[in-house]
Image: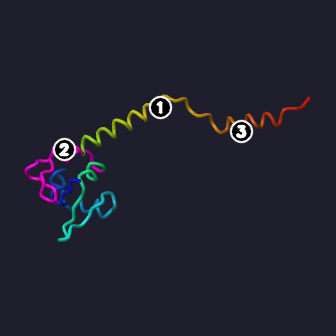
Amino acid sequence: MTQLRVGEAAHLYGCARSTVHRAIKAGRISATHLGDGTRVVDLAELIRYWGEPPTPPNTQQYRNVSGDDVHHETLEALRALRDEVAALRGELAEQRRLPAPPSIWDAIRRRLAKWIEPKS
């Protein structure tokens, strides 16, 4: 998974580092610490919270914490998220096509009507 330092994440989204730190402190974004104390955030976590970055990450500038080029991982993560969103939109469209469930009050009225009806 692609991990960005707080400064890199702020630069990618065009905001201040303090904005990213506030989001982490509030629990809106999860972050981890590396062995040297550097705080890093997963790119997928940033996309979940802020959406896709306004500009695609520059593969020469952003590298995985291990030093590998993140371009391929970033594209795969974005494709996976797009596929998931498309699947969820399809499920939502199917749900909207289903008939509305009967009201609980309709069921209560039917039972009461049977109970109250005079018996001949």
Highlighted magenta segment, given as a residue range: 49-76
Q: Earlier in the sequence, mark 2 or mark 3?
A: 2
Measured as percent of width and height from the top left, residue 60 is found at 7, 50
Work out how far the residue at label 2 is from the one at label 3, CA to CA, in angstroms: 53 Å
Q: How many marks?
A: 3
Query: Which residue has dot 3 on it?
Result: 108
Element type at marker 1? helix
Would residue 46 be found to the left or right of residue 59 on screen? right
Q: Quadrant of residue 64?
A: bottom left
Residue positioned 62% across, 34% down in the render: 102
Measured as percent of width and height from the top left, residue 62 is found at 12, 53
Q: Point out the image quarter for the C terminus.
A: top right
Q: Which mark is residue 96?
A: 1
Which residue of the protein is positioned furthest toward the bottom in this rendering? Answer: 36
Residue positioned 58% across, 34% down in the render: 101
Q: Amino acid at mark 3?
A: Ile
Q: Are dots 2 and 1 in contact, CB under 8 Å? A: no
Q: Amino acid at mark 1?
A: Arg
Q: Earlier in the sequence, mark 3 or mark 1?
A: 1
Q: Which mark is residue 54?
A: 2
Q: Quadrant of residue 18?
A: bottom left
Work out how far the residue at label 2 is from the one at label 1, CA to CA, in angstroms: 31 Å
